[in-house]
Image (cartoon, rainbow, N blue to C red):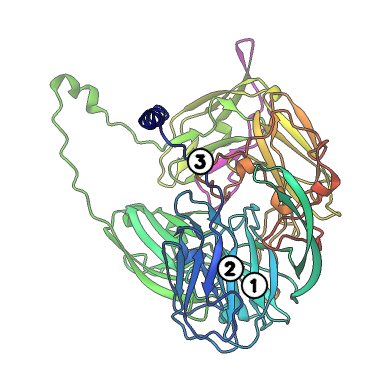
Amino acid sequence: MLLAMIAAVMLAACANMGRPEGGPRDELPPVYVRSNPAMGQLNVNNNRIHIDFDENIALDDAMNKIVVSPAQRTTPAISSNGRRLTIELRDTLLPNTTYTIDCADAVKDLNEGNVLDGFAMDFSTGDTIDTLRISGMVFEARTLEPAQGMLVGVYSNLSDTAISTLPFERITKTNQLGQFTLRNLKEGTYRIFALKDVNRDYHWDRSEDVAFYDITISPSSMPITVTDTLTRQNGERDSLVTRDATRFLPDDILLTWFNEGYTSQYLKDYKRSERNKITFQFSTKADTLPIIKLLNTHRAGEEISAWSMLDASPTLDTLTYWISDTSLVALDSITLETRYLRTDTNDELTWTTDTLKFNIRSVKKKEPKKKKKDDEEEDSVPKIPHMELRVTSGSSQELNRGLIVTGSTPIVDFDTTAVSFEVQVDTVWYPIIRPSFSRLDPLKPMTYTAPYQWEEGTKYRLTIDSAAVTDLYGLVNERIVHEFTTKKSDDYSTVIFNITGLDSIPAIVEVLNSSDKPVGTARVIDNSATIGYLTPGSYYARLYLDADGNGEWTTGSLSDSIQRQPEEVYYYPKRFNLKKNWTIEQNWDINELPVDQQKPQEIKKNKPKLKKGERDNSLPANDEEEDEFFDDPFMNSATRNSNFTNSSGYGNGTNSRYF
C-alpha cells in the first residue's frame, strides 16, 4: 500500500512539471544598507568610502555623475563590485570639513537597470557636520531645455571675480530633469552659479556655458510635518501617517544658463582657392574690417579696396575679396600686409600685422582635340563667355517676399531699364510697372532684391535683357525669362496670440516648427501678436522679453562691469494646428504654468532616459487645441500653480515668474 501511494505521488509530480514562472518584474532601485564611514559620521580620517546596497549594482558614467564635495583636485577612483560601491579620495582630507558623496543617477541595479536617483551620503572630518541645503532647477535660457549633468556650485566669497578665479566651495550636478540639491552647507551667505565645466577646473572660463543668480542666498531650515500614504503590496491604499521632517530653504532657485558667445579672435585661415578670389576666415564675429595692403607687383602699397570687391558674411568672420585687376589675377603669387584685431594674452583686442603669401599653381591647359572636318565650320566661331545670373525664387512665389536676383560674380552695374515685367490675363501677357531692383547690403555685391506688392494667384513674367547686368570682369548676362505664379492668400494660415502677464515689457513671439526653429516672428503690440503667411501644419510658439529693444534675443553677460541676465523666454505649452485659409486666436498667460511645465514634450530634447522596457508617453497634443490651454476640467488651481518637485520635495513659491 505504501509503495502504491509513493508511486501515485511521483506520477502527480511528473504530470505537473513545466517552466517555472519568473515572478513579478523587479521595478525597485537598489536600497542603501550601510556604509563605512557611516552616514553623518564625525572625525573621519579614512580616504576610502564603501557603500553597500541590498542587491548587485552597476554604475552609469560614474566618473562624470558621482560628485564629491568639496571639489577634488585629483579625480577620485570609483568602482563597484557586487553590492558594494567604493570611492577612494586621492586628495588629502581637509580638517573640520563636511564631505558629500552625491551619486545623482549613477547607481542602478545590475539586472533590470532600475536607477537610484538622488542618493547622497555625508561625513565630517571634524566634531560637527554641516546640514543646510539649497535646491532648484537649471534650464537653458533660449530654449528652456532642462540642463542635464550641469555643475552647480556656491561661493561664500561674494566677489564678482570669484567665479572666474576660484574653485567652487561646494558642488553638485543637475539630474535628468535639471533639478539640483547642494548639500551640507554651513550657515552663511552665498552666491550660486551653474557651469558647464569643460576643462574641469571648477570655475568659469568665458567660453563656457554659465548661469548666475542675481542675489545672494542664505540657506536655512524649518521643522514641518509630512503626511505619507501607506499602501499594501497589491497597491491599495492602507492609511495615512504623519511624521516630523525638515524643510530646507531656499528650494526653488531657478538658474537659466547662457553662453556669452565669447571666442578669442584670431586669423583662423587664409587661402586663394581660385585665381580671382582671396578668402580670410576669422575665429569669431567681428565689427571691424582688417586693413590690407599689397606688397608686391606694380601696385605695391595700394589697399585691397582699390583692386578688389568684398563679399562678406553678416558677422564679418568670413571675407572674400574678388580681385578686379586681371594683371593680378594672372600672377601665381600675391603678398599682402594684413593688419587686424586679435585677442592678446590679457584677453584684450589689439592690432597685429602679418605678412601673408597667397600662391596658386598654374594649371596647364590640355590641348584641344582635333575637330572632325564636318564640325570645323560650325565651331569656327568661338563662344562668347557670359556671367551667370539667376532668379532665386522658383515657379511659386510667396506673397510676403520679393524677387531676388543673384550673380555668380560681383555685379558692378544693373541697368534696370532693361528689365520688363508682365502679367498674364486670359492667356495674354500685359506689361506692368517693373519691380525696382537694388543692392540692399553693400557687402553682398552679388545679390539684388526687388520688393513687390503681389496680386494673389496671378501669373507673372520677368524678363532681363542680355547685357543688362555687368560683372566685375566686364562680362554680361544672357537674356533671362522667368515665369512664376503667386500663391493665394487661401494657401496660408494666420495665428493671433492674445497675451497677458507682460506688464508693458516689449516682447516678440516666435512661431516654431517641430524642430524648435523659428518660422515666423511678430512683435507684441497692445498685448497681441499676429503671425501670418504660415504654411498649413503643426506649430509651437515661444515669447521672449525684448528688454533692449533690438528685435533679437540677447544673451547674458557675466564678464561685463554690469552683469546681465539673458532675456527671459516663455513657451506656449501646447501644439497648435493650422489649415489652409485659417485664422485662429490663442489666449496665452505667460505666467500660468511654471517653467518646467511650459515647453511641450514633443519638442523637448533633454528628456529623462527611459527605463528598461518603458515606453515614451509624451504623446503629441490633440489636433484640435483648446483656445485656452488651462481650461481643463480636471485641472484645479492647485495643479496649475504647482511648483516643480525637487529633490527636497517641497517648494515655497517665492519666484513669481515661474512658481
Residues 238 and 419: in front is 238
Q: Are marks 3 and 2 in contact (CB under 8 Å)?
A: no
Residue 120 got which mark?
2
Q: Is residue 465 visible?
A: yes
Question: Vertically, is 392 above or below 157?
Answer: above
Extent of the magenta region = 425-454
Q: Image check: 136 left or right of 307?
A: right
Q: State which quadrant residue 102 falls in.
A: bottom right
Alpha-carbon span between mark 3 and mark 1: 39 Å
Give the mark toward the camera: 2 or 1: 2
Q: Is residue 541 above or below residue 57?
A: above
Mark nearer the viewer, 3 or 1: 3
Tell me which label, 3 or 2, sits earlier in the chain: 3
Percent of width and height locating residue 408: 43, 41
Under circle 1, the secondary element is strand
Q: Are marks 2 and 1 in contact (CB under 8 Å)?
A: yes
* Residue placed under numbered mark 3 in the picture: 23
Q: Residue 245, image x and y in percent?
A: 76, 67
User: Amino acid under label 3?
Assistant: Gly
Label 2 packing within 10 angstroms: few (<14), some (14-19), many (20+): some
Amino acid type of the residue that numbered disc 1 sits on in the rendered structure: Arg
